[in-house]
Image (tube, grey):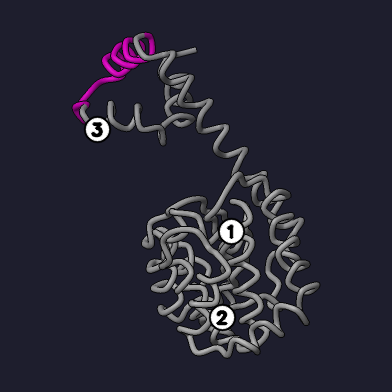
Amino acid sequence: MSKIPFLLIFILAVASLPVINNWLSHRSPILNDDHISERLDDYISKNFDKIIKTLQEESAKNSYANATKNKISQHKNETFDSTYPYSGNENSNVIAVGFFDYSCGYCKAIKNDIKQLINDGKVKYIFRDAPILGNNSLKAAKGALATYFIDKEKYLDFHYAALDHRGEFSDKTILGIVKNIGVNENDFNNSMKNNADKIEQMINNSKLLVRDLGVGGTPFLIIGDSLFVGKTDLNILRKKVNELKD
């Protein structure tokens, strides 16, 4: 069997890898079969370990992506639950779900990008309070959801104000946010008391989803069957939304 068919099969298997694409992009387009075979043999021999490592990494990424899609599918009803606070295009077929912690630096860093994504008007965005960074985060999440049960629009005001806050969330800090967004203190305290069980259940459900989806921290965002962890570039998120929108 000629070396050329075998080598072409090998190239097809790894053509998408950066190390191969980079090498091929610098080759002359006018080469005969013998020259191609000789040069490829030489390149593969010198870079065999790198090629195998890259293939393994790509395989691991694909396996992780498939596993993530399966997990999202398994927990679809719990994840895309519109009884949680949401904003954006209520009638959109594209639903995004964001998990966050008010003490999380990256959650604060992507706040404006998430605002932009919502303001694009192409997505329905569900907010999931998942306080995993301690008691201060838990206080803020409870304050946000207590506000939600008073006025759904005020929830967003609390959400963005809490993400703007720098430092710990004391009771005084949370009350300050509540007053600044125009929520009555007595109404807030009553909501904290009367809705305590519902608030705790909502938070626990979100934290369980973080665990069940196998994500180690916040922020992370689910759009369709794709998971975006950390401070993901806005253009990447928009691209995914547009793919699903089309």
Residue bounds of the magenta highlight: 27-45
What crowding class fits label 2: few (fewer than 14 Cα within 10 Å), some (14-19), or many (20 or more)?
many
Type of the residue with mark 1: Asn
Measured in 3D between alpha carbons, the distance from the residue under mark 2 to the one under mark 1, in whole angstroms, is 18 Å
What residue did someone put label 2 on?
155
Q: Does dot 1 land on a helix, a strand or a loop?
A: helix
Q: Does dot 2 land on a helix, a strand or a loop?
A: helix
Report the front residue among 164 and 228: 164
Q: Which of marks 2 and 3 is nearer the N terminus?
A: 3
Residue 217 position in % (x across, y down):
57, 48
Residue appearing at x 38%, y 56% in the figure? 233
Residue 189 position in % (x across, y down):
67, 82
The majority secondary structure of the magenta stretch comes to helix
Q: Earlier in the sequence, mark 2 or mark 1?
A: 1
Image height check: is 56 above or below 143?
above
What residue did someone put label 3 on?
25
Measured in 3D between alpha carbons, the distance from the residue under mark 2 to the one under mark 3, in whole angstroms, is 52 Å
Instruction: Report whether 239 appears left or right of 38.
Output: right
